[in-house]
Structures are given as structure tokens and as C-alpha cells.
Amino acid sequence: MASLGTLLRHVHDLMDGAVAEIYADLGMPDYRPRFSPAVRALVTEGPMSIRDLAAAIGVTHSAASQTVNQMSRSGFVTLERGADGRQRIVRLTAKAEAALPAVEAEWAATERAARALDSELPVPLADALQAVVDALSRRPFRARIADCAGPDLRSRLGAADATEDLGQGARGA
């Protein structure tokens, strides 16, 4: 049987790959499924900083920055300097605005397809994944591994790591 990480990546690849194929079929081969949450947030909220965009779509600043850079290279957003010079403000381009009908149609169809998939599962996929996120927020996976590790592995974690991980679970996986 495949490992947990392999299964998670495979599910993501199957779903994300199918959406990417749809965009390619629609004549948008440079549009990535990961762009849609950002596009939708920018349509709703208007131009915003990468930090605000990250918060709006629920990802780290680093992940939002990487997505925005890909979107910029593909011509879907522009980046402008913010008021203090350190911020970069993300703005949709005419190319992105022209793609909005396809993006919205794909988003709606994908949501319906996910609900149909849920009907075949013992529990809705989003509910299961949110439960995992919630559980790992309460106790990070690294701490859970340390709890289950034998003495050899636990000693290799180092005294500070093992103490922190076993005590407070302050680190993420």
C-alpha cells in the first residue's frame, strides 16, 4: 500500500491535473488551477498586497508570493509598489478579466463535481481534510511522530527539539 504522503500527492495530482486539462481545453494552457482562489479574491476585494491576498485565500505569504509570481509571468496579474515601497500590490490584468467567465464556470463545475465525489465517500473530502488541519493545529505532526518514536529516533531529535515537541507541540510538519 502507498504511503500517506504518496496518497495525498496522488489525490491532488488527479484532481488538480483534471482541472488543468480543462483550462488547456479552453485555450488557457498557461492558467493553473492554483490561480483561481487568487483571481476570485482579487475580483471580490480589488487590488491588494501579497500579504493580504495570502490571508484572503488561506495560504502562507510564501505560497501566495510564488503563485503571484507565476501569475505575473503568465500575464494574469501585474505587481506595483505599495505606499511604503516594501509591499507589492497585485492587480488583475485584462487577460485575467477576459478569462473570468471560464474561471467562474470551471469553479462552479468543480464544486458540483466535488459534491458528487463526496456522495461516493464515507465522509465529505473537505470535511475530512479540515478535520486533519484542525487536529494538526492542535498538535503538529512532528510532535505526534516524536510521541510514537522509539528511544533511538527520539534521541536523534536532540534534547531541545524532543522537549519542545513532546511538551508543547509548537512546530508543524
Image (cartoon, rainbow, N blue to C red):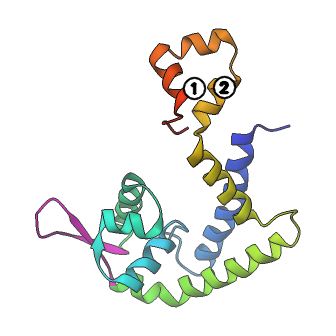
Instruction: Find disc 1 in the rendering and name its residue.
Output: 166
Q: Which residues are magenta?
A: 76-93
**Residue 77, x across and y down, in percent:** 33, 74
Going by the image, does 39 lie left or right of 117? left
Asked if residue 14 is positioned above or below residue 118 in the image, the reply reads: above
Going by the image, does 23 lie left or right of 158? right
Instruction: Find disc 2 in the rendering and name its residue.
Output: 147
Q: Check whether the beta carbons of the residues at disc 2 and disc 1 lie within 8 A of each other.
A: yes
- Residue at image position (52%, 76%) is 28
Which of disc 1 and disc 2 is earlier in sequence? 2
- Residue at image position (29%, 74%) is 48
**Kind of residue indicated by mark 1:** Leu
The image quadrant where one finds the C terminus is top right
Crowding at mark 2 (Cα within 10 Å: few <14, some 14-19, many 20+): some
What secondary structure is found at the residue carrying circle 2? helix
Which quarter of the picture shows residue 66?
Answer: bottom left
**Residue 7, x across and y down, in percent:** 75, 46
**Residue 153, x across and y down, in percent:** 63, 14
The image quadrant where one finds the N terminus is top right
- Residue at image position (63%, 77%) is 25
